[in-house]
Image (cartoon, rainbow, N blue to C red):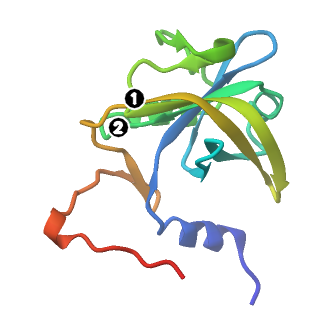
Amino acid sequence: MTVVPLEFRKALGHFVTGVTVVTTRCAMGTPQGITANSFTSVSLDPPLVSVNLSRTLASFQHFRSCRAFAVHLLGADQQSTSSRFAAHGTDKWSELDYGRGIMGVPILPDRLGVFVCSFYASYEAGDHEILIGKVENFEINTDAEPLAFFKGNYHGVIETSKNQRSSVAVS
């Protein structure tokens, strides 16, 4: 069987993911940011996370050579933030008030959570690069609902009641 890239992408869209905005700053100090849904934990000791970045991104080289980056978990009410950082050819930072983390990494003001990372490693993987960061600090809003992405659309998350939850066995 030959795997057709567009069909493969469509099939992967059937896996529900969270939505993040990943930020860094370029060598000249300009903030950079992208929307990504390929965020995951890698290790607890040391605390590592990863994000997969397409090599076709206009800002790819800035992330590839960064010394630090931040991964912002988006809340259910932040579709506009996701769309802003997913857009091409626009000033994503126009009229956006943001803070700064380690090494000047831009920190978005509103978010479900943020993981501020120093660069740890990167690995080439097909048409993407896996960027791994060592978590230096993090902040989570435990009362906010997450923004989810499924089959090419944004969704909310419905929490099941505690008596309906089941454990997952991994073999």
Q: How many numbered dots are placed on residues in this image?
A: 2
Name of the residue lying farthest toward the front: 45
Q: Amino acid at mark 2?
A: Gly
Q: Secondary structure at mark 1?
A: loop
On screen, residue 62 above or below 76: above
The x, y position of residue 70, in whole percent, is 59, 29
91 sits to left or right of 133? left
Q: CA distance from mark 2 to mark 1?
A: 6 Å
Q: Which residue is mark 2?
A: 75
Sequence order check, earlier mark of 2 and 1:
2
- Quick one: label 1, few (<14), some, or many (20+) residues within 10 Å? many
The quarter of the rendered structure image containing the N terminus is bottom right
Front one among 107 and 56: 107
- Quick one: label 2, few (<14), some, or many (20+) residues within 10 Å? many
The x, y position of residue 118, in whole percent, is 70, 28
Q: Are marks 2 and 1 in contact (CB under 8 Å)?
A: yes
32 sits to left or right of 121? left
Q: Amino acid at mark 1?
A: Arg
Q: Secondary structure at mark 2?
A: loop
